[in-house]
Amino acid sequence: MSYQVCIIQSDKKETHQVEAGEELIKVINESGFYLPNYCGGQGLCGKCRVLLKPAPAAKEQDQELLSSKELEEGVRLACLHQVEDNIEVKIEEGGDINILTGEEEVSCSLNPGWQQINLDINEPELNDQRSYLTRILANAPANDIEYKALDQLENLVAQNKNSSQNKEWGSFAGIINEDRIVKLTSATKPAKLLGAAVDIGTTTLVFYLLDLETGRQLAVDSAYNPQKKFGADVITRVQYTQGNPEGIEELQEVLVAGLNEGLAATAASIGAEVEDIYRLSLAGNTIMLHTLLGKNAEKIARSPFVPLFSEQLTFRPQDLAISMNNLGEIELLPSISGYVGADIIADMLATGVGSASEYQILIDIGTNGEIALGNEKELHACSVAAGPSFEGGNISAGMAALPGAVDSFTIAEDDFEFSTIKGEKPRGICGSGLLDLIGGLLEVGVITDSGALAKPADMPSYWQDKYLELDEVKALELFSSEEGQGGREIYLTQKDIRQLQLAKGSIRAGVEILLDEAEISYDEVGKVYLVGGFANYLDPEMAAKIGMVPGEVSDRIKQAGNGAGAGARMMLLNKALTEKAKSLQEKTSYLELSSNIKFQEEFTKQMSF
Ligand code: FES
C-alpha cells in the first residue's frame, strides 16, 4: 500500500507517492528538502521538527523534546515517524543557509599544466610529405596526441581540402596537457579551457569555476552536501556504513551526484558545458575524501584512527564518474591525518601558515576544531572535538545560519538588542549569536566565570525577571511565544552554556597544547587565522572574551573566510603548489589528543571563562 506525502518548505511544495512504513525523515531528505538531523535520526537532538497534518500520536521522545504548544499544533520529530497515511509535512526551518563561498579571486601564479595555443601548419606539397600530425607536433610543445584529438585532426583536415577556397587552411588551436595534445579545433573556434575547484564540506559544497588560460574566476555556486541525509556529522555517516555493506556506495553515489549537479549548474551559468572542464581540484576533510572515493572510513572513526590514504592523488574523471571532460584530471589535496584533512592543507596554502618566517596559528572551527601552529621550519597540528554547538546542534534553541536565526546580541544590564538573519522574527540562535549572548551575559554578571547562571538575587533585576527553571534546569527566557517565530519560546539553558564551554574549552586547550609542543609563547605568534563558515561571522573580540582564543592575541586575529575553497583554487591554477602541499603535509607533526593527559588537564582548566 502507498500514500501521498505532500512536503512544503518555504515556497517549495512537492507531492510524492510513498510506500507505507517508509521513514518520514528519509522521504523528506531523499526528496531534496533540507531538514537538520544532527543526531542522525535517533530522536535525540530535536532538530528535525516538522508540522504534520494529520498529526500522528506523539511518541515519548516527541514529548520530551517538544513544547506542549508544539505538540498540540501537530509538530513532531520526523525521525520518529513513518508514513502511515496521506499526510502533509511542513518543514519549519527553511530558506537558504548562509554558505561562506569566498567570491574574491585568489592570487597566485598561473601554471595549471594546461594551455591552449595556436597551431598553424603549411599545406602539404609533393616535396614535403610529412604527416599532418608531424606538422602539428613540430609547432606544439607536445610529443603525443589523444585518440579523440586525432579524430578531430582528421575532421579538420577533411574540412580544409583546398587552401585556395579556404583562407584559414591550417590554422588550428590545440589544448595541451603537459606534452600531450588533448583537443584540436579550428583557430577561429577555440575551445573553452576551464577548471573547477570544490570545497567538499561536511555540510556544504562550494564550487568555483575558473578560466585556466587567464586564471580568472568565472562563477561561484554552493549547495548542501547531499550526504547530510545520512547524518549531520562525519561520524554519524561512518556509523551508517557499519553493518550496512551498501552504505559506502550510497555515500559515494549521492556525493558524486551532488558534485555533478553543481559542476553542471556552475558551467551552465556562464554558457559552458561540463566537457569544457579539464581540471578539477578537490579539498575536503579526510572522511569526505574517503567517501568520495567509495572507501571505507570506519578505521578513521576508531582508535588508532588510521585513514586508508592521506596522499595527494590524481584520477581520471571516469574513475569516479565525475561529469567533466573525460580526458581531464582530478586532483585531491593531501591530508595530514584522519582528523586533519586536505581542507586544512588548503587553508595553509591560502593563509600562508607554515610558510611564513613568524609563527602563526590556524583554527578551523566546525564540529571538529582543527588547529595548526607553525612557521616555515616547523608545523604542528591537532584536532579537537568541538561538538555541533556552533552549528546549533546541541543547543536547545540552536539552529544553522538560516533566516530567523539570531546572529548577534548586544547585552546590557537592563536590556538586550539582537539581529536575525533576513530580519525575520527569532526562530533560534546560530553560532555567532550564541557567542555574543554568552560573552555579553558574562560581562553583566548573569553568568559567572565558572559558567554557572548566577543566583537570581545576584543578577541585574532585568535578567532576574527572565530567570526560570525548565524541568529543574536553570534557564533564561529570551523570547516569549509572542516574540518567537511560530509561537516558539526561545531559552538559553544552563546545559547550553555547558555545551559552549565544552566547545570553546577544547579549542583553546588544543591551542595551548600546540604552543607547548612548539615551546613558544603568545608573544612569538604573529597572526591567528580563523577559518571556516562560523569563524568568519563571529566577533573576534567575543571569541577572546569567552576565552576561545587567548586575549593576548586578540589584536592579531584575522578572519580568513573559506580558506579551503581558496587553497583548492590556488592548487587548480598552479601545479607547482602540489609540491608545496606535499611539503606542508610532510613537515606537519600531528598530535593525537584523545589519550593526551596534558590535554585533558588543559581542557578542564579552559572550561571556565
Ligand atoms: S531528533 Fe530527529 S534527527 Fe535528531
Image (tube, rainbow, N blue to C red):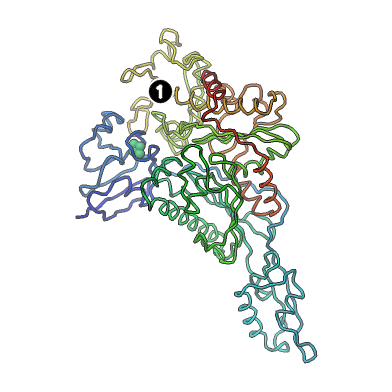
Q: Quadrant of the N terminus?
A: bottom left
Question: Does residue 42 show up?
Answer: yes
Question: Does residue 536 show up?
Answer: no
Of residues 607 and 429, the one drawn nearer to the viewer in this rendering: 607
Local crowd at mark 1 within 10 Å, few (<14), some, or many (≥20)? some
Q: Position of residue 341 (x, y in %)?
A: 57, 43
What residue is at 38 percent from the left and 19 percent from the top? Answer: 475
Q: In the shown orientation, is residue 275 left or right of residue 84?
A: right
Q: In the shown orientation, is residue 528 left or right of residue 406?
A: right
Disc 1 residue lies near ligand 1 with CB under 8 A: no
**In the rendered image of this protein, does residue 174 appear above or below residue 252?**
below
Q: Give the residue at mark 1.
A: 495
Q: Position of residue 451 (x, y in %)?
A: 47, 17
Q: In the shown orientation, is residue 604 left or right of residue 563?
A: left
Q: Position of residue 178 (x, y in %)?
A: 70, 64
Name the outermost residue toward the top: 457
What residue is at 47 percent from the left and 18 percent from the top? Answer: 415
Name the outermost residue toward the bottom: 126
Of residues 604 and 498, the one drawn nearer to the viewer in this rendering: 604
Q: Position of residue 51 (x, y in %)?
A: 29, 40
Amino acid carrying mark 1 in the image: Lys
